[in-house]
Amino acid sequence: MKSFLSSIFSAFASKPSAQPVIKGNVVTQDGHGIPGVAITIKDRPTFASGADGSFDIELTDERFVIEKVEKPGYVLVSPKLPFTSEKGNTRLQIVMKQQPEKTVELNEDSIRKFYEAGQQLHNQGNYQAAQIQYNHAIETAKELFGDNNKYLAICYELYGDNYFAWRVWGDSSVLNYADAKTYYNLSLRCWISVSGENSLDASRLHNKIGNCWWNLENAEEATKKYEQALTSLQNSGEEDPLLLASIYDDMGRTAYDNCDWKNALKYFKLEYDELYTKHLDKGGLDNKKIADCLFYTGNVMVKLKMSPVATFQEALNFYRAAGTWCDEVALTCLEMVKYYYDVQDYDQTKAWLQKLLLANERIYGKDSENYLRVIDLMGKLEKEMNTVKE
């Protein structure tokens, strides 16, 4: 019995048999240990190699399967995965090599992708994000083609457009126009080297720079740039009715601001020819632009003591065709009210006041100050008409 009990006690007192152990290292091809490599063995939690690349882990049985070996910036050289061993207490060496950083293939398409992404962000009003994309496009264009090429010209122009539209320093600031002008000038320099001084591209940039000067309240410099834009386009031998109309419009508005009524009328009529008269049968007319041109033409005619009735009426027809209720519609009706009142045609004055009231309701609402002013004017006109009858 004693021997039996002794054998039982001896059995309980004996050390448990050792578990299978896997010892190993993760190293580079030249034998340097790689720390922090994630190793996944089937049915076990993932663990990481130590500071010297070594690892030492007990297994529940002699068989194990390594499913993953991962570390950012490295690729596995050996062994192939999944790696299976049927023998415990295995010494294993895992070899990895550093993976070169992936480089983006730089080509013309990559430039376009950057600036087209910028254009989408610009159109969404996200000007700061657009600027980042344009910067990428500019850097890529310089790396591929140097400091003077058509892609830089495109990107600098878009960069200028971004500043022109972006109230980066606040609504009342003009600093954004100065920045826009800087990038338009860079674009112009590139376009001249690519397309020549007498080209559509150079003309367009001269005109945009003129617009910056106009917004910076320097009419003299603006006029110079508009004249350069016109000369460049005329000497190019190319046709672009919308660009030409835009130049005439800018020249007309500058003349208007300078109270140069005769030149203002001349340029607005030239603009109308380009927008409508010469291209009536070609389709694709921009009714809003035509209406705006006629609106300004009518205002100049008022200054020159000419009858604006037909011109303003035509402007309203084009606004109607454009489906647009805008400030200019109300202002056109107001000018008609003023004209008929000045010539003492009170019936027409009353009729146009009613049209003005409708325009103000559609544009500003019945609770607006503009709407209430027209109500007040209608009351005053009624009193005056009754006084005249008496």
Image (cartoon, rainbow, N blue to C red):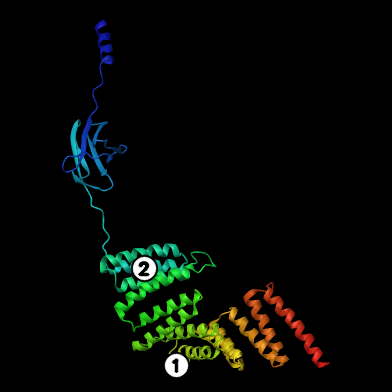
Q: Residue furthest left?
A: 30
Q: Where 79 sits versus 160, above or below?
A: above
Q: Residue at x 25, y 16 (%)?
A: 14
Q: Residue furthest right?
A: 390
Q: Where 46 sits versus 296, above or below?
A: above
Query: Within 10 angstroms of label 2, few (less than 14), some, or many (20 or more) residues?
Result: many
Q: Residue at x 19, y 30 (%)?
A: 89
Q: Residue at x 27, y 12 (%)?
A: 8
**Residue 102 point in image, percent of width and height:** 26, 56
Say what amino acid the circle numbered 1 marks. Lys
Name the one closer to the observer, 66 or 277: 277
Query: Is label 1 in a helix, a strand or a loop?
Result: helix
Query: Within 10 angstroms of label 1, few (less than 14), some, or many (20 or more) residues?
Result: few
Q: Quadrant of residue 103?
A: bottom left
Which residue in the structure is indicated by mark 1?
278
Q: Is residue 62 shown to the viewer in this render?
A: no
- The image quadrant where one finds the C terminus is bottom right
Q: Quadrant of residue 282?
A: bottom left
Q: Where 313 sits versus 121, above or below?
A: below
Which residue in the structure is indicated by mark 2?
115
- The image quadrant where one finds the N terminus is top left
Q: Are marks 1 and 2 in contact (CB under 8 Å)?
A: no
Q: Where 138 sits versus 334, above or below?
A: above
- Real-space Cα separation, disc 1 to disc 2, in angstroms: 35 Å
Q: Residue at x 24, y 27 (%)?
A: 19
Query: Is label 2 in a helix, a strand or a loop?
Result: helix
**Residue 265 point in image, percent of width and height:** 53, 90
Say what amino acid the circle numbered 2 marks. Tyr
Q: Is residue 345 shown to the viewer in this render?
A: yes
Name the one closer to the observer, 374 or 299: 299
